[in-house]
Image (spheres, grey):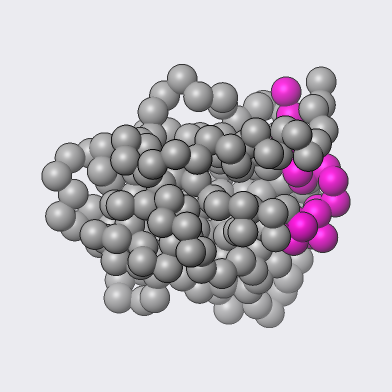
């Protein structure tokens, strides 16, 4: 059964804000529904096993549980930005016609952290993301935050002033990233929903049950 996102439900989704301290990826959260792939959705892609499959699954599930949009995860062996630029239909032909916006996690050396075509896709460079991480939890949290940042960039959203938000302007270093929350502030979240509706209609902001 579908559950249409209402203003109240959306408000509840973003009203989980408190201090970012203690905001960590954990299991037991609402999982990605099996039916999500059959509806218009955001696809989060692990490129070339850029992140270990267990970490990717847990980080993506937790991050996506915070935004209440229809999403799916997938994997591929390589990412070619130039091909996606030249052929906008490639995303759908590769991941299915219901994949309306893509977030790609890739190890891309010294390339910029984010490369995006707003309204279509974002490539997130996770190379070096584990540097200085005292344990696996810190790395997992960083991956979740980068997924949310990639989603926001793919939807054309910019930096946030809220220090609890993954898109906080001070979270662009690893040290800064560790201090932000795994969440999007209303100033990022609501514009993101509007952009998603532009590319995928109400269906993409209607999570499957």
166 is higher (above) or lower (below) than 158: above
Indicate the position of residue 116 as horizontal and vertical percent values.
57, 72
Indicate the quadrant where residue 10 lies: top right
Indicate the quadrant where residue 32 lies: top right
Can residue 163 be seen? yes
Identify the image quadrant of the C terminus: top right
Identify the image quadrant of the N terminus: top right
Question: Residue shown at 46%/70% (left/top)?
Answer: 114
93 is higher (above) or lower (below) than 202: below
Question: Residue shown at 62%/52% (left/top)?
Answer: 186
136 is higher (above) or lower (below) than 47: above
Q: Which residues are magenta?
A: 194-209
**Residue 207 in magenta?**
yes
Can residue 52 be seen? no
Q: Is residue 40 rendered to the left or right of residue 190?
A: right
Q: Is residue 206 rendered to the left or right of residue 184?
A: right
**Residue 161 in magenta?**
no
Foreground residue, 68 or 203? 68
Indicate the quadrant where residue 58 lies: top left
Indicate the position of residue 25 as horizontal and vertical percent values.
38, 34
Indicate the position of residue 122 as horizontal and vertical percent values.
56, 65
């Amino acid at each position: 059964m579908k559950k249409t996102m209402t203003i109240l439900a959306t408000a509840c989704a973003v009203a989980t804000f408190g201090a970012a301290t203690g905001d960590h990826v954990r299991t037991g959260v609402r999982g990605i529904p099996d039916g999500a792939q059959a509806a218009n959705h955001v696809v989060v892609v692990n490129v070339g096993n850029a992140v270990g499959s267990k970490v990717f699954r847990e980080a993506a599930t937790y991050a996506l549980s915070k935004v209440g949009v229809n999403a799916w995860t997938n994997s591929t062996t390589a990412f070619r930005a130039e091909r996606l630029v030249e052929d906008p239909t490639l995303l759908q032909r590769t991941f299915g016609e219901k994949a309306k916006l893509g977030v790609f996690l890739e190890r891309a050396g010294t390339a910029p952290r984010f490369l995006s075509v707003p309204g279509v896709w974002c490539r997130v460079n996770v190379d070096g993301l584990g540097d200085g991480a005292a344990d696996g939890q810190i790395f997992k949290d960083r991956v979740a935050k980068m997924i949310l940042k990639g989603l926001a960039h793919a939807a054309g959203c910019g930096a946030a002033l809220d220090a609890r938000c993954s898109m906080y302007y001070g979270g662009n270093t690893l040290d800064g990233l560790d201090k932000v929350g795994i969440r999007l502030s209303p100033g990022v979240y609501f514009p993101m929903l509007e952009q998603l509706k532009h590319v995928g209609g109400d269906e993409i902001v209607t999570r499957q049950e």
